[in-house]
Image (tube, helix red, strand yellow):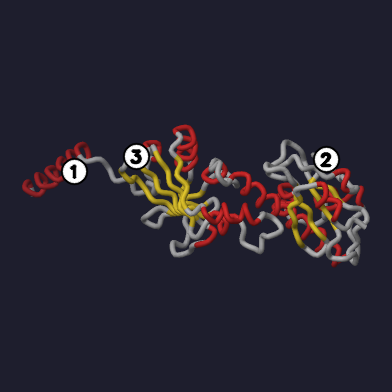
């Protein structure tokens, strides 16, 4: 019995010593990205090119042949400016771990981000929108809807904002077209924004999405950067302008006099045609050549 008690006391003492000398395992520790604040250079490698990353559909109405050629030439972009590297690394480090299937991928709609410290590679990450995939397959979620990993890439930023504007206008125009198919008419031009954002029974998520898409990402502050052509009806010819870029305002409606070229650089603005098409207009001549009635 004495030997048994001595053995028990020995085991207790050994366990105490072990706990003091060996740090406990953090069973609930979540995976984390490598510390990217050490990066001095970043490489963005697109799956095909920046053109394929930014525009997924026929884009001849959005980018000129020269712009398309330029974007297709950008397969890899090197960022070594310390401020830009720091900003991108800071956003990546703030990403939070998420549980997600490890075998999904975007291919064309993704890019690989290679992080270096001088000539030493620190990490290779796949970026799919707001999602980052580490080399071990763990996934992380960026906080912003427009990641600075792309927004801070000055070489393609104007085209990124143009692509986002195209999407915003397409989503807004698509919502108007959907409503017109149900009710047989577009909302009154003097209430078109209000009609989109105050649909009875809509979920909070959809209302937030409509509010989001009413804004041009390249424009300054304002609730809406688009205007409605009051002469366009659901049965108007498909090349009739329905929505177009304008200065900030709510329920704006009118003709080409409201159109603005100032939201984008290079200058220009998007229009949504009744046939569910977006065009990027660069000159007054192109603007007035559109069908408005």
SS state under label 1: helix
The label nearer to you, 2 versus 1, is 2
The residue depicted at 76 percent of the width and 51 percent of the height is 281
Residues under numbered marks 2 and 1 in contact, where contact means CB atoms less than 8 Å apart: no
Give the residue furthest to the top: 83
Q: Quadrant of the C terminus?
A: bottom right
Residues under numbered marks 3 and 2 in contact, where contact means CB atoms less than 8 Å apart: no
SS state under label 3: strand
Residue 276's spot in the image, x, y percent?
78, 63
First in sequence: mark 3 vs mark 1: 1
User: Is 2 situated left or right of 154 in this image?
Assistant: left
- Label for residue 85? none
The residue depicted at 52 percent of the width and 46 percent of the height is 142
- Near-viewer residue (136 or 205): 136
Callout 2: few (<14), some (14-19), or many (20+) C-alpha neighbours within 10 Å? Answer: some
Residue 228's spot in the image, x, y percent?
86, 51
Query: Which residue carries the number 2 mark?
Result: 249
**Real-space Cα separation, disc 2 to disc 1, in angstroms:** 71 Å
- Label for residue 117? 3
First in sequence: mark 2 vs mark 1: 1
The label nearer to you, 3 versus 1, is 3
The reply to whether residue 98 is in sight is no
The residue depicted at 37 percent of the width and 46 percent of the height is 29
SS state under label 2: loop
**Real-space Cα separation, disc 3 to disc 2, in angstroms:** 47 Å
- Near-viewer residue (84 or 13): 84
- Label for residue 15? 1
**Real-space Cα separation, disc 3 to disc 1, in angstroms:** 43 Å
Residue 24's spot in the image, x, y percent?
27, 43
Residue 73's spot in the image, x, y percent?
52, 54
Numbered-mark total: 3
Q: Quadrant of residue 57?
A: bottom right
């Amino acid at each position: 019995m004495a030997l048994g008690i001595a053995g028990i006391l020995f085991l207790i003492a050994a366990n105490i010593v072990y706990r003091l000398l060996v740090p406990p395992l953090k069973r609930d520790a979540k995976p984390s990205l490598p510390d990217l604040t050490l990066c001095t250079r970043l490489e963005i490698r697109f799956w095909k090119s920046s053109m394929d990353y930014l525009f997924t559909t026929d884009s001849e109405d959005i980018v000129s042949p020269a712009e398309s050629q330029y974007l297709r030439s950008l397969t890899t972009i090197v960022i070594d400016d310390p401020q830009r590297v720091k900003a991108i690394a800071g956003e990546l480090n703030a990403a939070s771990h998420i549980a997600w299937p490890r075998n999904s991928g975007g291919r064309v709609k993704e890019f690989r981000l290679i992080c270096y410290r001088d000539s030493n590679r620190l990490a290779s990450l796949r970026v799919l929108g707001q999602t980052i995939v580490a080399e071990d397959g763990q996934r992380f979620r960026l906080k912003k809807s427009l990641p600075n990993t792309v927004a801070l890439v000055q070489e393609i930023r104007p085209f990124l904002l143009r692509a986002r504007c195209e999407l915003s206008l397409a989503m807004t125009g698509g919502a108007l077209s959907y409503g017109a198919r149900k009710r047989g008419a577009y909302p009154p031009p003097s209430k078109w924004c209000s009609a989109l954002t105050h649909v009875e029974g809509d979920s909070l998520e959809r209302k937030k999405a409509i509010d989001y898409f009413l804004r041009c990402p390249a424009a300054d502050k304002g609730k809406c950067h688009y205007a409605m052509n009051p002469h366009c009806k659901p049965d108007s010819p498909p090349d009739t302008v329905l929505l177009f870029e304008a200065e900030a305002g709510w329920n704006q409606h009118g003709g080409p006099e409201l159109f603005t070229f100032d939201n984008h650089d290079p200058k220009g603005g998007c229009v949504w045609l009744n046939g569910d098409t977006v065009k990027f207009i660069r000159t007054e001549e192109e603007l007035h050549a559109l069908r408005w009635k």
